[in-house]
Image (cartoon, helix red, strand yellow):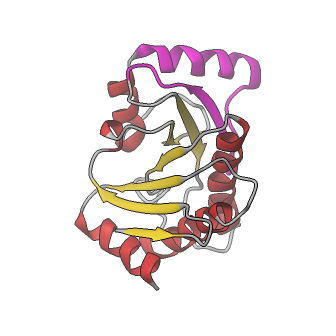
Amino acid sequence: MDWTSPTGRKITLQEGDITRIAVDAMANAANSALAGGGGVDGAIHRAGGPAIMRELEAIRAQAGGCPTGSAVVTGAGSLPAKYVFHAVGPVYRDGRHGEAELLAGCYRKCLALADERAVRTISFPAISTGVYGYPQNPAAEIAIREVRRHLERPDTTLEQAIFVLFGKAAFEVYREILVA
């Protein structure tokens, strides 16, 4: 399932394992301590190997972590990518504590990191929708809106953004929003 911008850039939806998709940059749903975890974060660390954690340890030593709504970059270790953008999404409380802006900030920061590195392809998981509890529909609306806006800019290096979704239910939510 694809959406193509007037500039020819694409958003693609795939159901599957983000660690198996070859891209220039892979976004990770990280925690603010950059300490590894479960879900997508755990899968990326298992597939990428210890080199990623060593880089995150250096970032933690210097910066102490990563604030919610932002992202940091490491190499990709053994993953089929050049970079991993570790994005820290918000824990969903009730939608009235800035969660939407923080989630949008994750996507914007990853897209800015992509342009800084002349990235042409990037993959995203459904940030914050797992253990952080962000409801799928509003999270997908934010993700697709931010990526679509970025791909419509004339100055981006990005050519394709791939949302790699875990499970048919998540895929269907993103599909409905993408075609709306």
Q: Position of residue 11 (x, y in %)?
A: 48, 62
Image spot of residue 109 (x, y percent): 69, 48
Quadrant of residue 59 in the image? Answer: top right
Image vertical order of residue 28 relative to residue 64, above or below: below
Is 171 covered by the magenta stretch? no
Expressed as whole percent of the image width and height from the top left, the position of residue 108 reads 68, 55
Say if 37 sits above or below 121 in the image: above
Q: Position of residue 129 (x, y in %)?
A: 44, 60
Q: How many numbered discs, if any?
A: 0
In the image, taking residue 1 as reference, residue 120 lies left or right, namely right
Which of these two is toward me, 88 or 155? 155
Is the residue 38 above or below the residue 145 in the image? above
Q: Nearer the viewer, residue 33 or 179?
A: 179
Q: Quadrant of the N terminus?
A: bottom left
Q: Residue at x 33, y 26 (%)?
A: 46
**Pick the front one: 60 or 108:** 108
Q: Residue drawn at (65%, 34%), measured in percent from left and top?
A: 72
Segment tinted magenta in the rendering: 50-78
Could you tell whether 54 is left or right of 103 in the image? Answer: left
